Image (spheres, grey):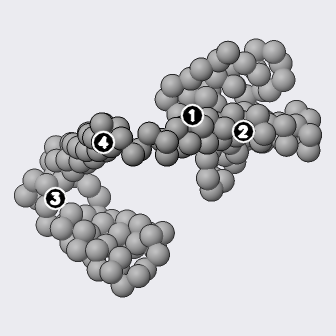
Amino acid sequence: MNRTFGGGLASMELLRRTFTANGSLDEADNAGLVAVSRLTPGTNILAYCVGLGWSLHRWSGALSALVASSLPASLIICVLTAAIVRVDRYPAVRMVLAVAVLAATLLVFSSAASLLRPYLRRPALVRASIVAIVSGAMLLADVTPVRILLLSAALGAAISGSARPSDVE
């Protein structure tokens, strides 16, 4: 049984190695599958598996890949959800879950702080503040997230021109 850690891209790489080693897939086909899977909304690895199944056996391959790549995880999630529903009434379980959520939240905020630290220095702080204020205003005005990202990127590019290394180091 193959297990991967690292998300969809690690799994795609393992599949690439396996299928190129047995001659079922070449590098050009793999590049096309990766590109299409990255552009497809949703889970990249699921799109990659369905595309790989299609390229090998058309409809039957695509459907088999869809079932094989989604059903086991779905069943595991159903079993875990049923287990949580049964044990959620115990205070000790609720405490463990609350601590886990708190730890995950702290990790996210810690990572965000590390990523933002270079932009919170004086030269970049003004630009970052303007982008944050405009993005927040667009969010409050019920502008869609995609438009917020596009407009924030355009605003950031317009304010900074070309990024100078001394501004973010």
SS of the residue under disc 2: helix
| Mark 2 residue type | Leu
Ranked by sequence position, the earlier of labels 3 and 2 is 2
- Name the spot of residue 112 as percent of width and height, x first: 25, 48
| Mark 4 residue type | Pro
Asked whether 152 or 72 is in front, the reply is 72
- Name the spot of residue 71 as percent of width and height, x first: 72, 39
Q: Quadrant of residue 49?
A: top right
Viewer-nearest of discs 1 and 2: 2
Q: Quadrant of residue 127?
A: bottom left
Ranked by sequence position, the earlier of labels 3 and 4 is 4
Q: Is residue 55 visible?
A: no
User: For residue 124, which numbered disc appears in the image?
Assistant: 3
Viewer-nearest of discs 2 and 4: 4
Query: Is 45 left or right of 132, judged from the image as shown?
Result: right
Ranked by sequence position, the earlier of labels 1 and 2 is 1
Q: Determine which residue is flagged by label 2.
A: 71
SS of the residue under disc 3: helix
Q: Determine which residue is flagged by label 1.
A: 9
Asked whether 21 or 49 is in front, the reply is 49
